[in-house]
Image (spheres, coloured by chain):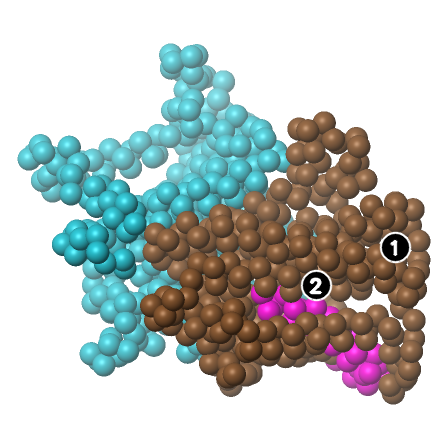
Amino acid sequence: MSTSETQPRGRRIPAPPARFQVPWLRTRQARLLMIAIGILLAYALPIVRPPILTTPDSDFGGVLTSMTSYALVAVGLNIVIGYAGLLDLGYVGFYAVGAYTTGVLTAQHWHWPFLLVLPVAIAVTMVTGVILGAPTLRVRGDYLAIVTLGFGEIIRITITNTPWLGGAAGIKDIPAPPSLGPDPVGVDQDGLFQIPHIAWNGLTPLIDNDHKTPFLVFGVLDAVPYYWLLLTVLLIVLVADILIKESRVGRAWEATREDEEAAELMGVPTFRYKLLAFALGAAIGGLAGSMLASGQGGFISPTSFLLLYSLLFVAAVIIGGAGNRCGAIVGGALVAYLPERFRGLSDWRLLIFGIALMVIVTFRPQGLLPPRRTRRAMKVEAEIEELEGEGVDA
Amino acid sequence: MNFAFLFNNFFELTITGLALGAIYGLVALGYTMVYGVLQLINFAHSEVFMFGTFAVAWVVVFIHGTDSATQGLGPTLGILAIAFVAACLTSAAIAALVERLAYRPLMRRGAPKLIILISAIGMSFTLAEVMGVRDKLAGWFGLQVRLADYVSQARNVYSSPITINPHGLFPIGNYRVTDVDLLIIGSAVAMMVVLDQFVRRTRLGRGIRAVAQDPESAALMGVNSTRIVQATFLIGGVMAGAAATLYMIRIGSTRQNAGFILGVKAFTAAVMGGIGNLRGALLGGLVLGVAENWGSALFGTQWKDVVAFVLLILILLVRPTGILGESLAKARV
């Protein structure tokens, strides 16, 4: 019985992907080149608008923006869940703190410039993370899940009931990030220059001069500049994420996640590292929240920070493969994209989303892109299984 | 901080809080049972409860018709008994479905815990949404008109046509305890005692405790763990069905997303009492219900949930494994 289930896993691992057969492609330069091409494609996506991907019932630029936003949140939450192994069901709280810090400082009570507010919002969220983490991280495992969930709800309810923060009505007219080039006057007559979109006639690409994206104006009409900004932020965060994960801190997280007692005995101050993971995750959540607040709509309200979103964020990280930053990005993008793609099915889309969640995890129990460590562990497991033969039912 | 209000209505707030807490406690039993056996948070349990509330409302519509009426508890007991059975059966069936679709395929493949959590969240979405599009589902079979009383306006509040008018029985302090209060608290405690004795004394209960303690040794001793897990879900479902009946007696209406908030509260109650602990679940529920009522009286109803979560955090800081903190495995015979 056990072999029939483990064999598909085992089969998948030993066969090396065909592209690794070409020696040149294995070099560092080739990898960097591929990454650079991928990044360029990501930037070009809202201009090229490939017909299979576009969302017929909602603005594609807007969908891409929210996908990137989710991906950014997922990368932040991946530090908490994937690296440090802490199940945080209240992550949306940090998102809210970042967004409201921005909202209050740029629109509600003060009028600070965006570039000054951004670091302040990140710092405030990070401090919030430490304040919430210090008492709660002493609680272990699943208790942490409910405690963080509680904190997420406390933050949301407090915002709803505090008139100083806009209450249930929220904060509106939050200024967008500063534009490059002349101030927006008309639809097409602004920015340093305009980039025409591509329209598809069947499979033939045509240049669509009626739809242009001004470079780089953060207005209310076009979501594409926001997408570019978010994508840039995401890339910067990713670089930081790689640097941290490959450092002593990353290894400490891994040790803590795998066996907290053993790590503690080896001299890893586990509590401090868990707190650090919590704070860094919070900071990225705050950054994403800040970008949301000064986004296209310039409007935030407590309904943007429901408990439901915490669950969606966790789903994004785990579907992608907890512990793998690329997985987190794919998961985040997918969780934002699926409901929009099926918007035409209005009433059915959440149902389809729920079923999709179940189907994805049933067929990929390790996530879509499991981290390399998990893949190695699975390979070893399959080998042991093979050596032991069919007699042992693990 | 409205202390005067709290003190003037102290008894009423306490008794109605206990009634609310009893409902939390019954739902919490479902969370705690599954957690005790599998160490997994069953996120779909709120939907098991939600289906139960609909079963109650449908039975009342089926027997009574759609004319709204206000009745005392006595004349409705017959309908309520049938509704109770229907709710328990429905909830148990849904719980079995959750186990079959969201848990068993993944448990067999030894998937990590977090993945199963996501599958349960997916199941929860799916169940809530199935209820939300039930009018269209009925339309597929051409039943939309014939079943209009049951399925129309699937996303709106769905009320039971009979409103139960509580009848004051005897005073405690300045509050007359009603028959509804007594029924809710009494039946919740009774269900809890039955379940507790069941887990302690029966063969199946021993199996549940064995699997909770050590699934591998239990399997070696001949316990069929798949069946035990199934039984655990079914029992949780029956308790949720009972909770759904009591909820409908008290609140009288439900909707497709009614389970979510109540589920969060019930899970909080389970953790507060000590997750995996049956008595703890009921105790946690009662504490939570009373604290919520007192808290809303003191700070205003909008802070009700904040009071609940702050209390949870405080309790966990003092007692990191909940008030009773004992696990299902360690329940003594």
The chain shown in brown is which?
B
- To which quarter of the image does residue B20 belong? bottom right
As drawn, the label of residue B242 is: 2
Q: Which residues are magenta?
A: B1-30
Q: In what element is the residue under mark 1?
A: strand
Please determine if labels 2 and 1 lie on a single subunit.
yes
Image position of B2 with respect to A218: above or below: below
Regarding mark 2 in the picture, which secondary structure is present there?
Answer: helix
Residue under mark 2: which chain is it in?
B
Pick the front one: B94 or A293 = B94
State the mark number for residue A204.
none
Q: Quadrant for residue A214, please give it.
A: top left
Tell whether position B266 is magenta.
no
Q: Colour of chain A?
A: cyan
Q: Nearer the viewer, residue B273 or A128?
A: B273
Q: Residue at x 80, y 32 (%)?
A: B146
The picture places residue B202, in percent across and down from the top left corner, at: 55, 74
- Characterize the magenta stretch by its predominant secondary structure: helix
Label whose residue precedes the other's in the sequence (2 or 1): 1
Residue sitting at x 41%, y 66%: B223
